[in-house]
């Protein structure tokens, strides 16, 4: 079965670690998609959703740290977007997955739209500010 989201170079922010994390998030969403299409048990879907929530928090913390180091001028606005997404992701746990396929597919569509939209429209805004930090941080480790 094909992936729900296929990584494309258009999603790259040209920062190796952040791109790696974005690919990981897309991978988790693809895993959720495979579970839905395979008719897996609710517990597995909710576990993967929990994994996504945890990884999202880790990713946001890392990305915000990089933006702070780079003195990204729209830092506060970007954090508000992250907070909103974290709240929405946490809110997904409150959904009742009784109408299994329809609700799960809506969750997947929401995640796909938010993440790809965020990466392409908002994360690219900090690219000029973090340019070169990736190499510096890699050489310090």
Image: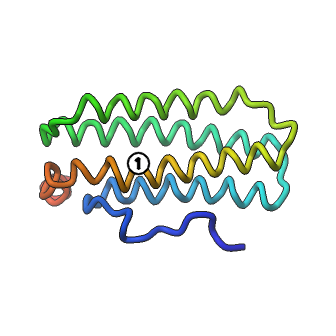
Q: Position of residue 94 (x, y in %)?
A: 71, 26
Give above or below for 118 relative to 31: above
In the rendered image, which quarter contains the N terminus? Answer: bottom right
Instruction: Give me the residue at 50% from left, 46% from top.
Output: 114
Give above or below for 14 relative to 40: below
Instruction: Give me the residue at 76% from left, 46% from top.
Output: 44
What residue is pinned by disc 1? Answer: 118
Q: In this view, does 12 lie to the left or right of 29?
A: left
Q: Is residue 13 left or right of residue 52?
A: left
Q: Nearer the viewer, residue 38 or 114?
A: 114
Instruction: Give me the residue at 24% from left, 49% from top.
Output: 125
Instruction: Give me the residue at 40% from left, 48% from top.
Output: 118
Q: Is residue 17 left or right of residue 95?
A: left
Q: Which of 54 and 126 is in front in this view?
A: 126
Q: Where is residue 11 in the image (x, y as percent from the top left)?
A: 38, 62
Secondary structure under the numbered disc 1 in the rendered image = helix
Q: Position of residue 13 (x, y in %)?
A: 29, 59
Q: Neighbour class for label 1 at 10 Å: few (<14), some, many (≥20)? A: some
Give above or below for 49 relative to 132: above
- Residue 39, image quadrant: bottom right
Q: Where is residue 61 in the image (x, y as percent from the top left)?
A: 35, 35
């Amino acid at each position: 079965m094909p992936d729900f989201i296929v990584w494309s170079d258009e999603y790259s922010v040209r920062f190796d670690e952040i791109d790696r994390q974005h690919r990981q998030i897309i991978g988790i969403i693809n895993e959720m998609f495979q579970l839905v299409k395979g008719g897996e048990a609710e517990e597995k879907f909710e576990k993967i959703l929990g994994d996504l929530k945890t990884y999202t928090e880790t990713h946001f913390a890392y990305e915000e740290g990089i933006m702070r180091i780079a003195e990204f001028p729209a830092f506060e606005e970007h954090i508000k977007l992250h907070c909103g997404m974290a709240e929405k992701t946490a809110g997904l746990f409150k959904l009742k997955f009784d109408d299994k396929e329809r609700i799960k597919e809506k969750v997947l569509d929401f995640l796909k739209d938010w993440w790809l939209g965020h990466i392409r429209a908002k994360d690219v805004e900090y690219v000029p500010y973090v340019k070169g930090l990736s190499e510096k941080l890699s050489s310090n480790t």
